[in-house]
Amino acid sequence: NVNEISMPDNCVSLFNHDDNIGNHFLFEDTAYYKNNRTEENGMYYLFNMLLESDKRKVNPNVVVKSGTRIIANQVFVGNTNIKAVELPKSVTYIGKKAFAQCVSLTIVKYKGTETQFNSILIEDNSFQDCKNVSYQFC
């Protein structure tokens, strides 16, 4: 009968976790999650969090929507069609294996400065197996 739970804006670890069967989200089986999740170009958001994607629908030139703060674990893992990613300057966290094995990824464009990009909490294996990636700041 829980109606509301408040979490601080800097909370990232409770939103998702990895296990042997994939990526899971806190409260993903609730009506709240199902009613508030939105889809845009094959990417699924819960407010300012990018939680998952559908490989069949995602454009090779991914544009993460403005205002997104969190890119969850494994959002794009293994999507070999992705060639470029544009990240808004609002991003503060990129989860484990978010872009891992996206072997065609060559450009990450960040809509902010290099200093701002360097302040993002990026998990060590977020871009695992991505070779020849160049970073652009604007």
Image (tube, rainbow, N blue to C red):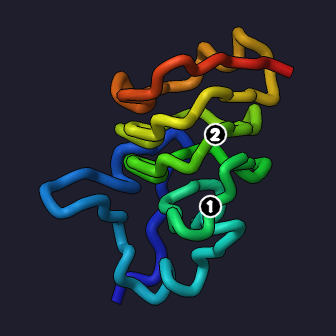
Q: Which residue is drawn at 36% across and 73% down?
A: 27
Going by the numbered disc 1, the residue's amino acid type is Val
On residue 83, the disc is 2
Image location (x, y in percent) of residue 59: 68, 57
**Residue 99 in picture, x, y percent from top left:** 47, 39
The CA distance from mark 2 to mark 1 is 11 Å
Number of labels in the image equals: 2
Give the quadrant of residue 101: top left
Question: Which residue type does callout 2 highlight?
Answer: Lys
The single residue placed furthest to the left in the displayed view is 20
- Judge by depth and name the residue closer to the eye, 95 or 42: 42
- Judging depth in this view, the residue of 126 and 116 nearest the camera is 126
Residue at 68%, 37% (x, y): give it. Answer: 84
The image shows residue 131, relative to residue 8, as above or below, that is: above
Give left or right: position of 114 versus 24. right
Picture quarter with the N terminus: bottom left
Q: Check the picture and name the quadrant holding the C terminus.
A: top right
Sequence-earlier tag: 2 or 1: 1
Q: Is residue 133 visible?
A: yes
